[in-house]
Amino acid sequence: MNVQLGKYKGLGLSRPNIIVKDEEINDYINKIREQYKVEVEKEGYIENGDYIAIDYDGYYEGEHIPQISRNNYHSRIGQGFFLDKFENNLLGKRSGDKVKFDLVLPDDYELKYLRSETVQFGVKILSVKNQMIPELNDDVVGRFKIEGINTIGELREYVKEKIYYQKIMVESANIINEIMNHVIENSKVELKNEEIESLECEILEDFKKELKKRNVNLEIYLSYTKKTEEEVLKQCELEAKTYLTEKAIIEKIAQIENITLNDEEIDSHNQLLYQKVIHFLLRENTK
């Protein structure tokens, strides 16, 4: 494979100044707190969003219907678990209340003989609860199950480092893409048709396997996306050419700069060589 490298050193790209703001730390911590919500009894009246436990019995023409009756049923008001008209009869009630009401079931109800029919419900409200996010203190932090983190101060430092690392990874990926795009655009790589075709077939087969995992085949995918098989093949060809071009450039830079692997690294040749060359390119092209 013939590779003529363009400029790949001294591009003078600036490394980003990574700053983690207090608001970002607070938002991250709040997301952790969200995972540790606790349910607390509500003394007031039922509102949208409340968590309830109820016993309810349904009757049609005086006969008890087990299919529309439940004991100790847990639900959340306003989330579509019950018919809106059912829930509307519970709003404004409180724990311990008993409610009776008539309800016309919809014309697409699962029990055909009850469609569009009027049924009677008796409901006993067992409990009404809210989910509360715990206040942030050292005791709560200790429940977050983050190894070595037991205080608010330790948690903030942990989160700050985590966000910083995430930002570094994103910015590094952006710079790497910029460097590689520049090198590819200014280099000439002659690829062999048989290599392209072989990898193109592999990419297509991998794509089909991914579709199969989602219980979809290529025909369904094409129908849904309104793409042609030729367009999919063209995309596979493009991915094959891009991969092979980048691989050839990486190997050429490694050869010129004498970037090698030791005996223990040989088994993971492709990935480790790529990483070493990328580290070299970052060092040589950023300031």
Image (cartoon, grey):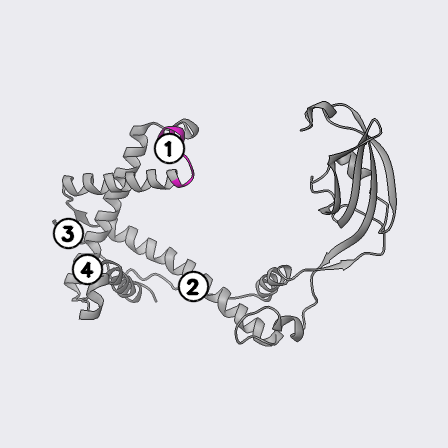
117 in relation to 8, above or below: above
Question: Where residue 195 appears, x then y in whole percent?
Answer: 17, 43
Give the foreground label among 4 and 1: 1
**Alpha carbon of mark 2 to alpha carbon of mark 1: how far?**
38 Å
Residue at the disc numbered 1: 217
Q: Which residues are magenta?
A: 213-222
Marks 3 and 1 close (CB-CB < 8 Å): no
> How many numbered marks, from 0 up?
4
User: As shown in the figure, which amino acid type bears the numbered disc 3?
Assistant: Gln
Residue 253 disc label: 4
Residue 4 disc label: 3
146 in relation to 76, above or below: below
* Quadrant of the snapshot with the C terminus: bottom left
Q: Is residue 219 magenta?
A: yes
Name the quadrant containing residue 24.
bottom right
Identify the mark nearer the N-term, 3 or 1. 3
Marks 2 and 1 close (CB-CB < 8 Å): no
Name the quadrant containing residue 142.
bottom right
**Alpha carbon of mark 2 to alpha carbon of mark 4: how far?**
24 Å
Question: Where residue 179 appears, x then y in whole percent?
Answer: 30, 56
Residue at the disc numbered 2: 168
Question: Where residue 81 appears, x then y in whole percent?
Answer: 69, 40
Q: Is residue 228 visible?
A: yes
265 in relation to 131, above or below: below
Question: Where residue 98 appears, x then y in whole percent?
Answer: 87, 44
Using residue 118 as the reference point, say whether residue 214 is left or right of it.
left
Using residue 255 as the reference point, say whether residue 202 is left or right of it.
right
* Residue drawn at the location 31% of the way across and 29% of the way down: 229
Tag 3: Cα neighbours inside 10 Å, few (<14), some, or many (≥20)? few
Q: Pick whichever, 45 or 72, lies toward us.
A: 72
Marks 2 and 3 close (CB-CB < 8 Å): no
